[in-house]
Amino acid sequence: MKALVYYRSVGRYLLAKGLNRFWPRTFFAGVAPLRLQEMEFSPPGPAWVVLRPRLCGICGSDLRLLKGAESFLLEPYASMPAVLGHEVVGEVVEAPSGSGWRAGDRVVVEPVLPCAVRGAPPCRYCAAGAYNLCENFLEGDLAPGVSLGFTRGVGGGMAGMMAAHPSRLVRVPDNVPDEVAVLTDSLASALQPVLDNFPADRHTVVIYGAGIIGQHLLRLLRALGSAARVVMVARYRFQEELAIEGGADAVMLSPSRTLLGEAVGARLAPTTLKGGNLEGGADLFFDCVASTSSLQEGLLTLRGRGTYVMVGTAGALGPVDFSSLWFRELKLTGSAMYAHGVCQGRTVRTYEKAVELLAQGDYPSQGLVSHLFRLADYRRAFKVAFDKRRHQSLKVALDLRD
């Protein structure tokens, strides 16, 4: 079968990292340690379900890997070579007896590889349903890794065939087309922080970053009934238009600190250096960018005892003034993948809830999948995903259907 394989090369990783410091919107296909190659398919174990991928989305974590932007400290939690792709819509080809699955079933794959998948006794987090925080990602029957697409020997969705543990599959209803189902993973990634940090109707919320995760965050707040005031910070005009369609109360294109402060009801307190502080502000700040500047603006934009949620993934960040953290008694938290959450008074599996929302028919998904490419054209797909400004790309996916 054909498979897109990322292999370990420290030199190429560091070269990509250096080049992307100067050309962050450019995919250097000749530098990235990435090959489309023929390889034999073999499931990790007899209990796994064999799938034929139909669509596979390109995730921000895939782009960060190709840019050399991942944290060096997260190296132990991936193993190479690995077939890329974890945002998978697939069709069951073969399933073990008693698994509950049969040939022809259309599914999405929850890619996390916790204790239950690794054949390890449940750790304290898996036992509590928070398997996104599993303590055995380095142990068990599989190679070290958190997720499909980043774990040696497990496979990924950017290939002709793959396998998944039966417990990781969620059925796709007939009324949900592949082009909508491929949004499940990004939707679940946004749903988890929303469930964990749902605002009161009286609150003001900032969503900083209007890519696919930010767009989902906005739509989820509205779909789940939040009447909070939502201010969205976008970088490009097409993102602004989608945010307006998604229900934002205000959308700002790369605003100054003063303008962002005004939008959330804060006033500027001038300083000699560093651009001024803000007094008052938002109750909740979802950071979908996770950069030095977004972290700094988040700390300053929150009112006393507000909550900052890092939704985007980050490694090392540059100098940030943390005085607001103690001065205003802020809460800082992160959001890693998905597991379970409380939705409208009941505990739900986040991935299943994401599919349920897409199946209702009223979730505003139009325009969120911006581009589809064949697997053979993966270089073009990554170029489009890298350069959002030029291509107006949001969710780019590979189409593996015949």
Image (spheres, rainbow, N blue to C red):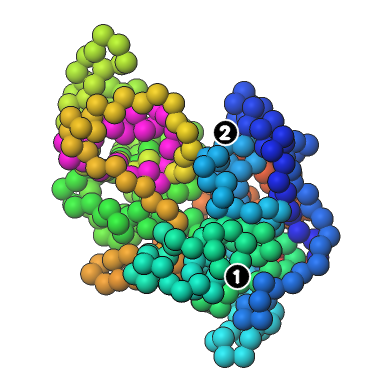
Q: Are marks 1 and 2 in contact (CB under 8 Å)?
A: no
The residue indicated by pointer 1 is 141
Q: Element type at marker 1?
A: loop
Magenta-tinted stretch: 288-311
Name the spot of residue 25 as percent of width and height, x first: 61, 32
Three-letter amino acid code of the residue under disc 1: Asp
Helix, strand, or loop for circle 2? helix
The mark found on residue 389 in the picture is 2
**Which quadrant of the structure image shows residue 63?**
top right
Residue 67 is situated, as x and y percent measured from the top left of the image, at 62, 37
* In front of the other: 25 or 66: 66
Q: Is residue 294 magenta?
A: yes
- Answer left or right for 187 relative to 384: left
Label 2 is placed on what type of residue?
A: Arg
* Lateral position of residue 215 relative to residue 153, left or right: left
Q: Reply above or below: 147 against 280.
A: below
Residue toward you, 309 or 113: 113
Q: Which mark is residue 30?
A: none
Tell me which residue sits at (37%, 72%) in the image.
Answer: 127
